[in-house]
Image (cartoon, rainbow, N blue to C red):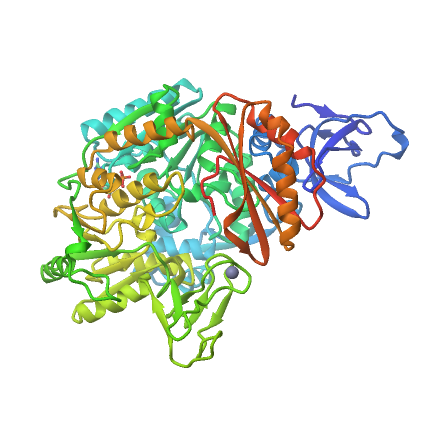
Amino acid sequence: MQGFFDEGTLVAVLTTQPLDRCLDYKAPEGGCMAGAFVEVPLGPRKVLGVVWGPGEGGYDLAKVRSIIRVLDAAPMRDEMQQFLRRAADYTLTPLSAMLRLATRSPGLGDPPGMRTVYRLGTGEPDRMTEARAKVLEVLRDYGGLSFTLRELAESAGVTPSVVKGLVKQGAVQEEASPRDLPYPRLDPDLPGHDLTPDQAAGAASLQAAIETGEYGTTMLRGVTGSGKTEVYLEAVAACLARGRQALVLLPEIALTSEFLTRVQGRFGAGAAEWHSGVTMTERRRCWRMVGEGGAQLVVGARSALFLPFRDLGLIVVDEEHDTSYKQEDGVLYNARDMAVLRASLCSAQVVLASATPSLETWANVQAGKYRRLELTSRFGAAVMPEMCAIDMRAEDLPGGKWISPRLARAVAQRVDRGEQALLFINRRGYAPITLCRACGHQIGCDHCDARMVEHRFQKRLVCHQCGETKPMPEKCPSCEAEDRLSPVGPGVERLAEEATALFPEARIAVLSSDLYGSARALKAHIESIAAGEADIIIGTQLVAKGHNFPLLTLVGVIDADLGLQGSDLRAAERTFQLMRQVAGRAGRADKPGSAMLQTYQPEHPVIRAILAGDEEQFWSAEAQERRAAGVPPYGRMAGIILSSPNVQEVFEVATDMARRDGPLRAINAQLFGPAPAPIARIRGRHRVRLLVKADKAVPLQGALSKWVAQFRLPASLRLSIDIDPQSFY
Ligand code: ADP
Ligand code: ZN
């Protein structure tokens, strides 16, 4: 439908304002393209929009206002419009909210700005030093390419003053240039590593898929360290060689820099980055260059899926099982599923890489919808760690302590040998509960139905739901008793304290996401740990995500039962994945590793499956149970959360909704609830849940829309619909 509208023609414009329809405008002077990014008048304001198609008309043309101006950006492609429409329909999100996701580029309406860049000059430096020579070498290596001061200094490994000195001598030229420069070209023809036979087979198969130029999805499974990254980089190479763009999604910003180093090694230049850790200028550059073809490879967070790629040929979703791919705020979408949707609309290939794929992906492979590639062994000598359970019922452990004598002995042994040990606990902070030993009061959040978690490093109590913090009180807020408040249960900080007492000689490092001011600080710390600057690592699930610690040979899981307690339908799956990921940290290089799981229920089927390492069997059993229960991925679910400051109002509406469920019954869906949500109050809003369960084949979204449309909701009430919910809090 990509077409052109002459000046004065009626066009429909989708704006980023929360309206549920397009608005009609007249095409501006000079006309406009379908898909053009435009500025339009709305009441007294100017707002951003996209020319969505021909106008509807049917009213007095003289009253229709004109588009103010067309922005200097490549028009939205037809396929992107389709993607937004389909994603909106699937997630039951207004199109305008989808458009907001697709226009998160700062300064979209600004004219291109200028910045200072550096390139090779004609002069000769008076005196050649090693540092100066490096700068000139970098400039020569990259041909006519220009650098910012920082880029040039960093590439050459010198201080900016060296560059400035060369500018004075005329050997380097300083000039103003448009801000949004294309990214350095990646060279897919540079040689990669020599691949092992199963890596080579995997790479060949992905390359063949890319060559078809069609849509397809492949699950790439292999234990941590088997070379999945190595293999999908070959798919990226094939994609770039065809002149198409590639996108790699990572679940955690902290993983980006390690990945960029590998991209640099493989293709001779880095990739464009899109995540919350990059500057506004870089975000803007990325958004524009992706649209103009000046970025070949983007590495990013889930929202990178909404970048305006000109010709996207490959999407890699690394650690595809990771729960952070599900956006739990605003537009509730799962980036893994949206990647598949987007790829199917632009004839791209998808690679879903994981050591422990989600059951959804596993089921799609079984159903023949996705292809399957397996890397069977770890690269080099490394093997999967030996796993064993520590039956905590038999360990003699005093209250307030969590490291069993058996685990402590194993840790001491590694430390003596100069190896590293990791103690894993998936809980941030010092202690999850602060209890008054005089009256039994537990300190809670004032705005949420949740306990405050003590963070001793920060000397504060923090609510993990709303982020509210307060200082640790001196006396009990309820009975005013002094010195009777005491911590209950372990967090990563408290475990560090215990480890310090047990191993006073050891160097202990704590890895928890809240202890770092920036992604850079975290990265630096991870690198120093990997280089051996710690004997014992105490970490939360941050460490489970793909970092390389070559000296690590022992993983101790402090509480393997923790994830099994929830009522979440994916509790078993999550525990299985997390434990395998964590265990996979041990013995990555040439030393064999082992993993010890502290548990009070060693006979639990999930714990047994983890110990046996029999994944196929675990998945079949889990699949069978979910199929029998008719839950995802074998049935469909939608979570409905109603929230309001007024508890009575929220229950009344929810009860009314449950009563008038005709549209849901029409598709034979079952409705559960209303019930108070597990966290019944967040940020002062009372929360009530309803749950809809339906057969896989039914048109669930249509029925949900019809059902919800029956109700006039009070303004103070918020309703959110979560298709395929991942969390149930
Ligand atoms: P995964 O993504 O499955 O965790 P990686 O691709 O990160 O595995 O590989 C683990 C480590 O082994 C990396 O440091 C990688 O560079 C190295 N490696 C894997 N395959 C090869 C190979 N064929 N040649 C050289 N190094 C390799
Ligand atoms: Zn709170």
In the displayed structure, 105 sits above or below 339; it is below
Residue occupying the point 18% across, 68% down = 502
The answer to whether residue 217 is visible is yes
x and y, in percent, of residue 537 in the image: 24, 59
Looking at this view, is 674 or 620 the one in front?
674
In the displayed structure, 627 sits above or below 457; it is above
Looking at this view, is 182 or 360 the one in front?
360
| Left or right side of 700 for 511 | left
Looking at this view, is 444 or 408 the one in front?
444
Numbered-mark total = 0
**In which quarter of the view is residue 416 placed?**
bottom left
x and y, in percent, of residue 44 in the image: 81, 48
Residue occupying the point 34% across, 48% down = 565
x and y, in percent, of residue 665 in the image: 58, 25
State ligand 1's quadrant: top left
Quadrant of image for the N terminus: top right
x and y, in percent, of residue 125 in the image: 39, 59
Residue occupying the point 45% across, 27% down = 635
The answer to whether residue 235 is visible is no
